[in-house]
Image (cartoon, rainbow, N blue to C red):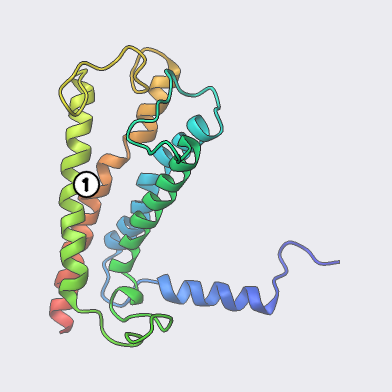
């Protein structure tokens, strides 16, 4: 009888390929490894909270969920799942700032496979992302702390984030890690740029 610990050759090869692709390259400081692995975790709580509350309608949120800027043909439940997946994929790209695929294009990219990734093509989008994320999340956090929306209007009484009950505190706990995404990405970008400049 096969146990859960047993793995097929295909699974072993997949695991080895995954590990090789995402392992830190030589010269990556330990703090950068931890920061890169932490970035996807900064987006995960908010993604899980959105999916649980909006898609699966668990009683962890307060207030209604309007359609906002979502087109009428796109159900809010599906939009939240897609937004959450996109957030996680974007956050996961931070690992490229410490891994081999951030320095050499992977084999599965036609026309580029095996070529060195130009440093500016990684640094510029990562730096812009770090700046935008830091400004956006900080502004949103400060606005909510002042009882205002990001547009300066007073928060509605049923705003999901707040200290009035456990659901509001849970929402704050889910969204608070996003404040770290931009600064961590900025530090990783600087570390990547320094490492690539030395190895060039």
Q: Position of residue 189 (x, y in %)?
A: 19, 62
The residue at 16%/56% (across/down) is 128
The quadrant in which residue 1 appears is bottom right
Viewer-proximal residue, 105 or 65? Answer: 65
Viewer-proximal residue, 18 or 111? Answer: 111
- Left-right relation of 175 to 135: right
Q: Quadrant of the C terminus?
A: bottom left
Viewer-proximal residue, 67 or 48? Answer: 67
* Residue situated furthest right in the rendering: 1
Q: Secondary structure at mark 1?
A: helix
Does 47 sit above or below residue 24? Answer: above
Q: Which residue is mark 1?
A: 133
- Left-right relation of 56 to 79: right
Q: Position of residue 121 (x, y in %)?
A: 19, 72
Q: Position of residue 183 (x, y in %)?
A: 20, 49
Give the total of numbered labels.
1
């Amino acid at each position: 009888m096969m146990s859960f610990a047993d793995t097929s050759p295909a699974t072993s090869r997949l695991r080895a390929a995954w590990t090789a692709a995402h392992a830190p390259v030589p010269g990556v400081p330990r703090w950068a490894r931890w920061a890169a692995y932490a970035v996807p975790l900064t987006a995960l709580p908010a993604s899980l909270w959105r999916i649980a509350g909006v898609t699966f309608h668990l009683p962890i949120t307060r207030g209604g969920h309007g359609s906002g800027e979502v087109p009428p043909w796109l159900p809010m439940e599906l939009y939240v799942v897609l937004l959450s997946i996109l957030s996680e994929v974007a956050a996961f790209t931070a690992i490229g700032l410490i891994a081999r695929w951030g320095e050499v294009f992977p084999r599965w990219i036609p026309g580029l496979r095996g070529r060195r990734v130009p440093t500016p093509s990684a640094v510029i989008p990562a730096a812009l992302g770090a700046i935008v994320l830091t400004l956006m999340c900080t502004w949103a956090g400060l606005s909510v702390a002042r009882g205002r929306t990001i547009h300066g209007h007073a928060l509605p009484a049923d705003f999901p984030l707040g200290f009035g009950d456990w659901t509001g505190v849970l929402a704050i706990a889910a969204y608070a890690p996003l404040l770290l995404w931009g600064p961590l990405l900025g530090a990783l970008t600087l570390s990547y740029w320094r490492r690539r400049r030395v190895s060039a």
